[in-house]
Image (cartoon, grey):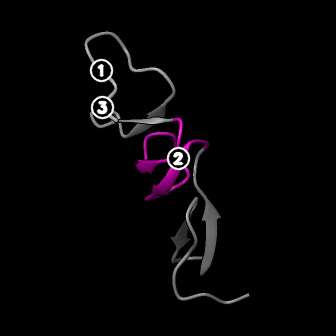
């Protein structure tokens, strides 16, 4: 169906005029890539320096609920 805004977990591909699925773990994104996450689904944390969604924060970072 046609929508004006893509649902959570998808981003708008303007060239193809379609909603495309975000990378696993991303709730909102700017593209399909793992480093194009803008926010994450529940159970994932947004690694701001890498723009990725991770289940465990790497060394030097902590999970901020």
Q: Quadrant of residue 47?
A: top left
How far apart, in angstroms, are the residues tagged by discs 1 and 2?
A: 17 Å
Q: Secondary structure at mark 3?
A: loop
Q: Is residue 32 left or right of residue 51?
A: right
Q: Judge whether 56 appears above or below 8 on screen.
A: above
Q: What residue is shown with label 1? A: 62
How far across and how far down the image is residue 22, in percent?
A: 58, 54
Residue 12, image x and y in percent? 52, 72
Residue highlighted by disc 2: 41
The disc label shown at residue 64, or none: 3
Q: Residue furthest top?
A: 59
Q: Are marks 1 and 2 in contact (CB under 8 Å)?
A: no
Residue drawn at point x = 29 percent, y = 37 percent = 48
Of 58 and 16, the residue lying toward us:
58
Which quadrant is home to the N terminus? bottom right
Q: Nearer the viewer, residue 19 or 39?
A: 39
Task: Check disc 1 and report its element: helix, strand or loop.
Answer: loop
State yes or no: discs 3 and 1 in contact (Cβ < 8 Å). yes
| Side of 46 relative to 18 (left or right) | left
Tell me if mark 1 has few (under 14), some (14-19) or many (20+) residues whose alpha carbon lies within 10 angstroms of its own. few
Q: Main secondary structure of the magenta part?
A: loop
Give the left or right position of residue 61, taking residue 12 as reference.
left
SS class of the residue under badge 2?
loop
Q: Residue 50: horizontal and vertical position, in percent?
A: 34, 33
Instruction: Indicate whether residue 38 is drawn in magenta.
Output: yes
Q: Confirm whether the magenta stretch covers residue 31.
A: yes
Q: Residue 8: percent from the left, percent from the top?
A: 55, 64
Task: In the rendered view, tell whether residue 65 sits above or below residue 12.
Answer: above
Q: Which residues are magenta?
A: 24-43
User: Which residue sits at x=52%, y=43%?
Assistant: 42
């Amino acid at each position: 169906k046609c929508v004006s805004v893509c649902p959570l977990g998808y981003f708008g591909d303007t060239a193809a005029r379609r909603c495309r699925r975000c990378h696993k773990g991303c709730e909102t994104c700017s593209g399909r890539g793992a480093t194009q996450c803008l926010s994450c689904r529940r159970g994932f944390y947004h690694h701001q320096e890498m723009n990725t969604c991770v289940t465990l924060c790497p060394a030097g970072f902590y999970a901020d609920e």
